[in-house]
Image: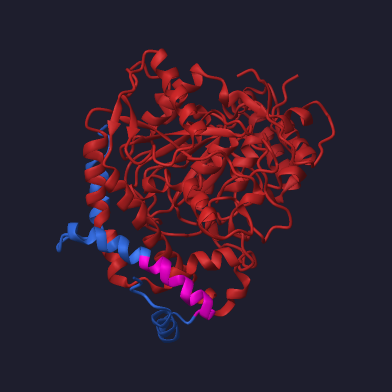
Chain colours: A blue, B red
């Protein structure tokens, strides 16, 4: 069941993105947008409130090879 | 008589420095090969013969004067057409760029300049580095795989892999957001390095997705790649993503007497969807290492974690890509190719909370992956491109599930490293039945490039895949006429190392 509809895409495009999309393309995009929304929805339960995206740089050095 | 376009970068640099050969002779050898086969593989956007000759003459005068010489002195290179050089325009594979000269020079190019490297020209790439198969309709002729010109060179650093494999240059810079250095290297039989995120400055490089983009070298062997990586690495205050760590000194580490890092065969995720021929080549590569006394136990990875990573990678890549291209997509969408437009579209409709939440997960993903993957080993052996190299015809003008599955198969094993920020190296390990190269991917902890290159170098001491040349190169070396017939060329013989 699609969560994103062609109408949603068309409305958001008119209000914000303002790129050239045909009605056919608006309908096609719903599939990809649903996939991306589902990807973050599946990952969301493991999110911590107080994590900063820049924590990734901390993790890089934390897990790095030690000289 | 040595054909210096086919000698290794390391040997060539040593010969120039010692006066055994002039840089101008090397340049002429590369230009001669480009004249003979460049029209078959179409990897140059611009070949600056006059500039190369002038720079080579300058390099020879420096040798004659006894000036201090860098580790790449007088050696011809060429790079993906997305690096700024002051006074020059980069096209980025697009119709939208190329008109305005850059006002500064990319840090990676400046470091190569300082090391004495010469630049032969600008190399083809996928439009705005968005696409894995190498096809770019903005070029008049398709960049083609030198092992068989009917097959794709992969992308997005398509010209880089082709130019190095075809012995037109001794090394090249690509860029890698989801596999764009490693995949072109894999399908052209050369070595490609994805450095740790932040290891190499991106200042002056075209952005695709700032959370994932890395600059990396392609070369014929691990030793050559190590030299290039050493030169271009290091902190850069002009790049906010730059890590404050010194270069890896990877080439020096190749001669280390220390035991090799511990190896493990990646299991979980990487073997999924693997073509039997690729799986067989990987098994044989592991067997080669084991026969030489290096244990390669299986390491069970968290496949669910890697699937999550693979699913989130396009969310961030597309959101950041859309942000970069919003103005042009609004005003000049007709100047984007159909395929790149389609790739960008979704990025304009990704909610900001989804994008930010995805980024918030990266640190936890990396910690979880590293804890499990590197608990008992230092380096993972995994497949690179999961399928035999497709033809150009199979990858152009198609839509639908089968086509999308093929595109996904090209980068499913590489893009997860970009998300995790880990270094990875593509190393040639043989050929599939269609005569095209196949590669393994070595994966390490952050900043483990020297370890990966030690393993790659050790493997190349045990095997000869990296010494094989496309028949296209062999025919041109013999002075034979080259037919644009697209037939299988394959390898003819090995050259002396």
Q: Could you tell me which residue is drawn at 41 percent across and 48 percent down?
A: B415
The answer to whether any part of residue B179 appears in the image is no
Residue B207 horizontal/vertical position (percent): 47, 60
Query: Does residue A50 appear left or right of residue B284 in this picture?
Result: left
The residue closer to the viewer here, B97 or B484, is B484
Looking at the rendered image, the quarter that the N terminus of chain B falls into is top right
Residue A21 among magenta residues: yes
Q: How many marks?
A: 0
Vertical placement of residue B294 versus B47, above or below: above
Query: What span is colored magenta in the figure?
Result: A19-34
Q: Position of residue B62 (x, y in %)?
A: 64, 34
The image quarter in which residue B297 lies: top left
Is residue B56 among the parts visible in the rendering? yes
Q: Indicate whether B492 appears above or below B154.
A: above
Give the residue drawn at x 40%, y 56%: B238
Where is residue B402? Give x, y as percent: 53, 53
Q: Position of residue B479 (x, y in %)?
A: 83, 29
Q: Is residue B246 left or right of residue B280?
A: left
In the rendered image, the quadrant that contains the C terminus of chain B is top right
Residue at figure coordinates x 31%, y 63% from the top left: A38
As displayed, is residue A45 above or below residue B370?
A: below
Q: Nearer the viewer, residue A52 or B59?
A: A52
What is the magenta segment's predominant secondary structure? helix
> What residue is drawn where x is 39% and y is 78%?
A5
* Magenta region includes residue A60: no
Question: Is B197 in front, or is B77?
Answer: B197
Give the side of residue B86 with respect to residue A12, left or right: right
Give the residue furthest to the front. Answer: A1
The quadrant holding residue B28 is: top right
> Is residue B481 positioned above or below B294 on the image?
below
């Amino acid at each position: 069941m699609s969560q994103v509809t062609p109408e949603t895409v068309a409305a958001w495009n008119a209000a914000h993105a303002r790129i050239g999309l045909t009605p056919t393309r608006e309908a096609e995009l719903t599939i990809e947008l649903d996939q991306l929304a589902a990807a973050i929805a599946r990952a969301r339960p493991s999110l911590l409130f107080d994590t900063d995206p820049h924590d990734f740089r901390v993790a890089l050095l934390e897990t790095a090879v030690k000289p | 008589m040595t054909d210096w376009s086919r000698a290794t970068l390391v040997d060539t640099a040593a010969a120039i420095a010692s006066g055994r050969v002039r840089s101008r002779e090397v340049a002429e050898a590369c230009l001669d090969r480009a004249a003979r086969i460049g029209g078959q593989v179409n990897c140059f956007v611009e070949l600056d013969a006059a500039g190369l000759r002038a720079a080579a003459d300058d390099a020879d005068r420096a040798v004659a004067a006894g000036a201090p010489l860098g580790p790449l002195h007088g050696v011809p290179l060429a790079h993906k057409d997305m690096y700024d050089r002051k006074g020059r325009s980069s096209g980025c594979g697009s119709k939208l760029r190329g008109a305005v000269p850059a006002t500064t020079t990319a840090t990676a190019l400046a470091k190569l300049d300082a090391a004495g490297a010469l630049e032969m020209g600008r190399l083809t790439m996928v439009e705005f580095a968005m696409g894995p198969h190498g096809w770019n309709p903005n070029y008049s002729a398709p960049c083609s795989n030198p092992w068989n010109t009917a097959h794709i060179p992969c992308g997005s650093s398509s010209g880089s892999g082709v130019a190095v494999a075809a012995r037109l240059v001794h090394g090249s810079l690509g860029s890698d957001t989801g596999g764009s250095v490693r995949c072109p290297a894999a399908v052209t039989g050369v070595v490609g390095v994805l450095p740790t995120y932040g290891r190499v400055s991106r200042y002056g490089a075209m952005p695709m997705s700032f959370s994932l983009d890395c600059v990396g070298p392609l070369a014929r062997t691990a030793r050559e790649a190590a030299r290039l990586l050493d030169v271009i690495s290091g902190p850069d205050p002009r790049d906010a993503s730059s890590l404050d760590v010194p270069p890896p000194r990877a080439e020096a580490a190749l001669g280390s007497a220390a035991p090799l890092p511990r190896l493990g065969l990646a299991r979980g995720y990487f073997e999924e969807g693997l073509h039997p021929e690729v799986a067989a080549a990987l098994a044989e590569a592991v067997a080669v290492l084991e026969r030489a006394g290096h244990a390669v136990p299986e390491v069970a990875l968290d496949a669910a974690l890697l699937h999550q990573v693979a699913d989130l990678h396009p969310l961030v890549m597309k959101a950041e890509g859309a942000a970069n291209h919003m103005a042009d997509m609004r005003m000049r969408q007709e100047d984007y190719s159909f395929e790149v437009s389609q790739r960008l579209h979704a990025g304009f409709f990704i909610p900001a909370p989804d994008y930010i939440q995805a980024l918030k997960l990266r640190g936890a993903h990396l910690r979880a992956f590293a804890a499990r993957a590197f608990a008992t080993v230092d380096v993972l052996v995994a497949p690179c491109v999961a399928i035999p190299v497709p033809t150009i015809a199979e990858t152009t003008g198609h839509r639908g599930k089968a086509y999308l599955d093929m595109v996904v198969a090209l980068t499913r094993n590489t893009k997860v490293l970009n998300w995790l920020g880990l270094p990875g190296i593509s190393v040639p390990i043989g050929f599939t039945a269609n005569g095209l190269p196949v590669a393994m991917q070595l994966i390490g902890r952050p900043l483990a490039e020297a370890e990966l290159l030690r393993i790659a170098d050790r493997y190349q001491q045990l095997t000869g895949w990296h010494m094989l040349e496309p028949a296209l190169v062999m025919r041109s070396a013999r002075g034979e006429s080259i037919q644009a017939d697209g037939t299988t060329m394959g390898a003819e013989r090995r050259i002396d190392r």
